[in-house]
Amino acid sequence: MKGYLTYFFEQHKRLILGYSVSLVIAMILSLSLKTTTAPVCVTILYVSVFASLAPIATLNSDREIDQLLSMPGGRKDLVAAHYINAVISLAASLVFAAAVTLLTVLFGGKSVELPSAPVVCYLLSLTLFIIAIMQPLSMLFGRKGLLIGFAALLFILFQTAVRLVLTYGGAIFAKYVSMWFKGEQERNIAEIIGDGVRLPDISRPVFVIIALGAAISVFAASFIICRLVFARRNFRVNKL
Amino acid sequence: MALLCMEHASVRYDRFNLDVSLTVEEGMITGLIGRNGSGKTTTFKSIVDVVRAGGKIEIFGKDSRKLTEDERSQIGIAYTDVFFNGEYSVPSIRRILAAAYKNFNGAEYDRMTARFGIPKKGKIRNLSTGELAKLRFISAMTHDAKLVILDEPTSGLDVVARDGILDELRNYMEKHEDSAIILSSNITQDLEGLADDVYMIDNGKIVLHENTDTITDDYGLVKCTEEQFEKLDKEYVKGSKKAPYGRDVLVSQKRFYLENYPGMAVEDGMLDHCLIVLAENKEEQA
């Protein structure tokens, strides 16, 4: 078990690099856009990507799995370590998300005005696109050309749907987070979000539940997708 | 004492069935030879339960699936083309092995990586084919394993590196007299100078098991015409295959044929002869 956990944790060093990049992106966006909304949304989703991909990024070929299964722990320990890794990755991502949000809000934008909707939507849809498409496709086909072709097509399809979801979901999430840290949770949501968007008032507990539910859903969905992909590749660990 | 005992260990694929029985004794180096796709790697994977096999597989006198983590850590295994994710760094492999194997010998790991010129930094995927083969070998040999399983450890290596690997194997057995090594190789000369006994596998079945010295001392290849072959005493004939001049006949007592058939050429036995004749003989029969 110790060997497997070490193996997975060695992989996390790459994730920490990813988190750090996200943090820098968030800060740059925040300073340049003079707002907190877009960078917060982007970084939270970025770390979600890393979190959801972490457990499977380490087990991406049958040969690698063969190597791990040959180590002392065997199948049961490998599966156990796999799930421990998944949980730790999620927890770590949430910590990073919180840290990024805090830093961005405290040192980033001076305003909580919503940037132009297209900017947020494009950035977030791009991120979601990466979550949903890149990893499974690259695992299935492993060819960049095919990936780019699919990417272009799916990006357009995604954009419309994602825009609707994120205009409401992402904006609410980011606004609530920023309000939370700035002590502005009493303000009228509709007033903050901007013209043309009327949103229901949501209490903090409800918001927390929705946010957690959304995060877990994203994580679970990507996990399920990847497990299905693995099943197609005769992912032996799943056959237990 | 047998450190590994396989009795009708069987694996079924769509177009391939493995059914292997073999024994690896303490203090011995056992060779496994066979053509590509004959089942060598599958045999090795079934030993450590990477591939689920039927039949009986005992390691250290115990059902291989019931080994504890400590017992499994006394097995060292290196495959031809299986290793950790290429994104991992060379130093991280050392840390992973140290965590996984309770008897991991860091000093030995450092000595061997220095001897084989493995870079101290950088990602695995940036290593050359030879460096990767050597690192796989090192990862199997540095935790004082009682049972070492090596799938073509010299594949893709230059002559110097091959010699270094064989040298390390000999030294290992000198230092670990209660251990055993089973290895496969397509370079049969390596096994002739190293292995105590040899199994030959073909199409998933063991078709020959012999002491290596017996093969080199007693076995022979009789070269004869078809007419001479018809009249040949078949008592010690193991198999034959067609040749431009008639037949190559693998025999287990070359002196018998040297004495009784002075007109025929008889070459000393080599593992290559066994491999070629027995494999082709089977094809002819089929």
Image (cartoon, coloured by chain):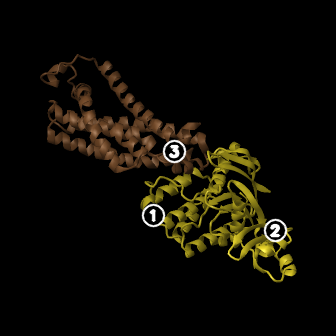
Chain colours: A brown, B yellow
Of marks 3 and 2, the one in the foreground: 2
Which percent across, then down, holds residue B16? 64, 49
Which percent across, then down, holds residue A221? 40, 31
Residue located 32% across and 34% down the image = A98
Q: Is residue A90 left or right of residue A103?
A: right
Say which of A167 and B240 sits in front.
B240
* Residue B285 position by quadrant: bottom right
Say which of B126 and A48 sits in front.
B126
Q: Distance of mark 3 from mark 1, alpha carbons? A: 24 Å
Q: Residue furthest front?
A: B227
Q: Chain under label 2?
A: B
Which image quadrant: the C terminus of chain B?
A: bottom right
Which dot marks residue B127? Answer: 1
Which percent across, then down, holds residue A59? 48, 45
Q: Chain under label 3?
A: A
Residue B179 can be seen in this image: no
Residue located 60% across and 74% down the image = B163
Which amino acid lies under the numbered mark 1 shown in the image of this protein?
Answer: Leu
Check disc 3 and report the residue beneath it.
A5
* Residue A132 position by quadrant: top left
Of marks 2 and 1, the one in the foreground: 2
- Answer yes or no: are tags 2 and 1 on the same subunit: yes
Question: Dot 3: few (<14), some (14–19), or many (≥20) neighbours within 10 Å?
Answer: many
Say which of B43 and B124 sits in front.
B43
Which percent across, then down, holds residue A210? 33, 22
Q: Is residue A187 left or right of residue A90?
A: left
Which amino acid lies under the numbered mark 2 shown in the image of this protein?
Answer: Val
Check disc 2 and report the residue beneath it.
B237
